[in-house]
Amino acid sequence: EHRVLTLTSNSEQIAIPITSEHIPNVYVSLYILKGEDATNPLASFKLGYAALSVSPREKELQITLAADRDVYKPGDMATYEIRATDYAGQPVQAELSLALVDLSVLALSGDQGPDLLAQFYRERGLGIQTASSLSISRDMVVVEKETARDAKGGDGGGAGLAVREDFPDTVYWNPAVRTDAQGRAQVQVQLADNLTTWRMRAVAVTRDTEVSTARIDIITTKELLIRPVTPRFFVIGDKAQLAAVVHNNTDRDIAALVKLEALGVEVSNAEQRVTVAAHGVAKVTWDVVVQPVTAVDLVFSVSGGGLADAARPVFGLLPVYHYSTPEVVATAGQVEGSEQRVEVVQLPDNLDPTLGDLTLKLEPSLAAGMRDALTYVKTYPYDCIEQTVSRFLPNVIMYRALHRLGIRNEELEAELPKMVSTGLQRIYALQHYDGGWGWWVSDDSNPYISAYVLFGLNEAQRAGFGVDEDTMSRAAAYLEKSLQARLDTKQTYPADARAYIMYVLAEYYADHEGLGDLGRAITLYEQRDALSYYGKAYLAMALQLMASSERTRPRALLSALVTGAIRSATGVHWEEKEIDYWSMNTDVRSTAIVLQALLRLQPDQPLIPNVVRWLMAVRREGRWATTQETALAVMALTDYMVSTGELAADYTYLAALNGELWDQGKVTAENVAEPRTLQVAVSTLLRDIGNQIWLQREAEAGQTGQGRLYYSLYLRYYLPADQVKALNRGVILSRQYTLLDDPTRSLDQVKVGDVIQVKLTIIAPNTLHYLVVEDPLPAGCEAIDASLKTTSAVYQSPKMEPVLEKGRLPYWWHFKHSELRDERVALFATLLPAGTYEYTYLMRASIPGEFLAMPSYGYEMYFPEVFGRSDGARLVIAAE
């Protein structure tokens, strides 16, 4: 607001009313003009400012949380009463976000959340800022489903005793709880099985932007309870000492029977008796040996004095790992017409006969054949930006294709919204200031990877998901700018990257205002000899999108592709002259991209069916070698599936193993998208001669015989533990354990509570791209996360250091990202020049026993044939 006043003296008072509109502060400026007069021959002015602080008290809500009691049992229903009043104590209608969180989690990371009053009403400086008030806060419609908890039954812990096994970190979250006109609301929460302190945290706001936060704690406990003490996982052959701590919260001593019921381990003295003093604790231990299984199921129980409790470990079923990674031998093909096919599997001499399996997957269509591939990208364990996009992109493409073909995949439809939403939020968070993305957030923006992200965002938007337009437009601007750099035609990779960027921008501008850079595309076409096969394919598709009437240049590019095709008994594919590391490209990936170009621009090309046959034949365990290969292959094969209407099928099939019927069935339009999986253990197969798998496809009376039967066959086996030694296939690794207090001496025996320093030595004989190094932990140890609030400040975070060569640091030596996980530590390098590096981290011995430490393993993520491993180790942890 402003006023114009006439000052009649040189000392006047001006009254300025201070209201709630001025919270948190206001500036008063005074601009005085004095014209000419007898004493002032020249006009003059004065300017001054005064800052006035205004208390935000009127904007602070008073939120009261009250639980119906302080102490509960697991599974009880807790009722919370909420009351909201303004600064004067008058009831107000407010909207609250409520979260009920296990306080032990908050102890690790801190009770996070800003001071809302300070966030909304901190004092501002004098200035003007402009911004858009519109932003996407949600990118999907959330369908809330109220599901009742299943009654928990127990396989162990005594007859009729419920087993506690549901241990979530957050048991309740509701972002839109509203108080009524009297300022009141009520919520009910069914508590989980955790025996802990729960903190309800409320964040509130009103339509007048009055804000506040509030907290209240409750406890879940039992009079007699048991707490399991176990590792998070096992390795086959581990010898561990498991424990349980029994708490007696009553006023009397209890003679208790304590049991361990276990599947997957050998256990002695499973039942033990112990007397627990009033308000005391007792510890019971069991020595176990881990068997060759995939998971261990443990149920600990205690009963006595008319009370009882039973619980599984917080981690649930404990996974069991083999000392070595599995070796997989695979083949694949398809059966057409009335064809018969025989595959022979010969077991290697040096396998572990107690583990492994032979799997035959029968797939009546491409839709069925790509299910494993979609699951692979969806469940890939790491989250660089490429994998974040690859997790949802092929699933989005498949979803759209099935929708167009009138086929429902209820599982995909249910999971896809959450999958896309999670991916989009991570993409938004990792976008750099310049609009691009790197492999990890600490990497510089990379045009090729950024183009892949924009392509994924655009496809998600085409599928009907809400995508932030500002994120996309910033990415497009970044890619446009990257094209302005001069092209060096002597380098293949920049030319291929430019072709891909032009294609992605053409796809983006097809749905948004703007034009692709046709001039640069034509210039690149004139220099097409610098392009790889996949670069030519992308440029052909880009030209077709930018100028649909243009035929000559795309046809010339397709002609070059057809000429370069390699024909073999397994089909048709393309092989590049050189490996393009920066684009993560392989021959499988190039073949998939060329297939896409042929389907779009020359759908009647006779090569296409044989290209599809080759792509399906080179799968391994139902998917391709990397996330990039898998994502691109799924997208290309989905295009083929849509263009050919390949989902019509009506035939009968038979499968036999070593002369005995293994499976038979009929394929119709109703089950054409459903794969069939057959599996037998290695121990049941023939060792001295080859195992014969016989497949037959035929049309019975009344059947048309239409459709194809794809199959993939793979043998998964393990090497005996004594044969797992260090191996160098382009990466050299070694590992050393030392005590933190004495890092000069290697060790293989420690005691519970010791802090161990782990040093990995990594030797790169040549420059490595997109390197991953995984170091499995011994099951009795926990990696120390120095970022947690409960970790002592004296413990250092993991660090990477080069081994100096002639006193100089190698160029760009550091790793870009590392992760501490339950069972391993992983680190990642986008580019690692040739040299020697040392990575150190800390772990704490926590469970007594003898534990196998699986070998460290390093590999190029997109070129997994480049790998290496260290020797394994055995670590003995003695009880305190």
Image (cartoon, grey):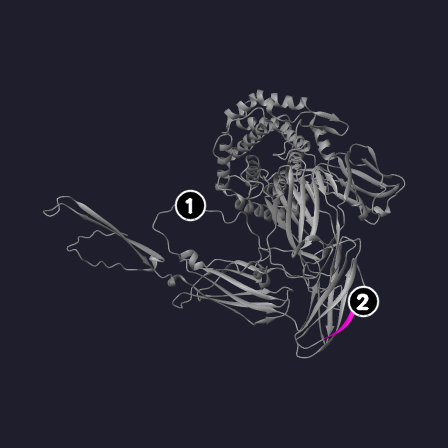
SS majority, magenta: strand
Q: Amino acid at mark 1?
A: Ser
Q: Is 762 displayed left or right of 497 in the figure? A: right
Q: Nearer the viewer, residue 865 or 209?
A: 865
Q: Which residue is mark 1?
A: 132
Q: Nearer the viewer, residue 23 or 44?
A: 44
26, above or below 456, in the image? below
Tell me residue 264's x, y (percent). 78, 57
Tell me residue 131's x, y (percent). 41, 45
Is residue 444 inside the magenta stretch? no
Disc 1 to disc 2, C-alpha distance: 68 Å
Which of the 4 quarters of the picture holds residue 80? bottom right
* Residue found 51% across the figure and 25% down from its top: 520
869, above or below 636, in the image? below
As drawn, which residue projects farthest toward the front? 806
As drawn, which residue projects farthest toward the left? 38
Q: Which residues are magenta?
A: 271-275
Q: Which residue is mark 2?
A: 269
Q: Nearer the viewer, residue 50 or 338?
A: 50
Tell me residue 771's x, y (percent). 65, 40
Could you say whether the residue bearing mark 2 is in a helix, strand or loop? loop
Pointer 2: residues within 10 angstroms few (<14), some, or many (20+)? few
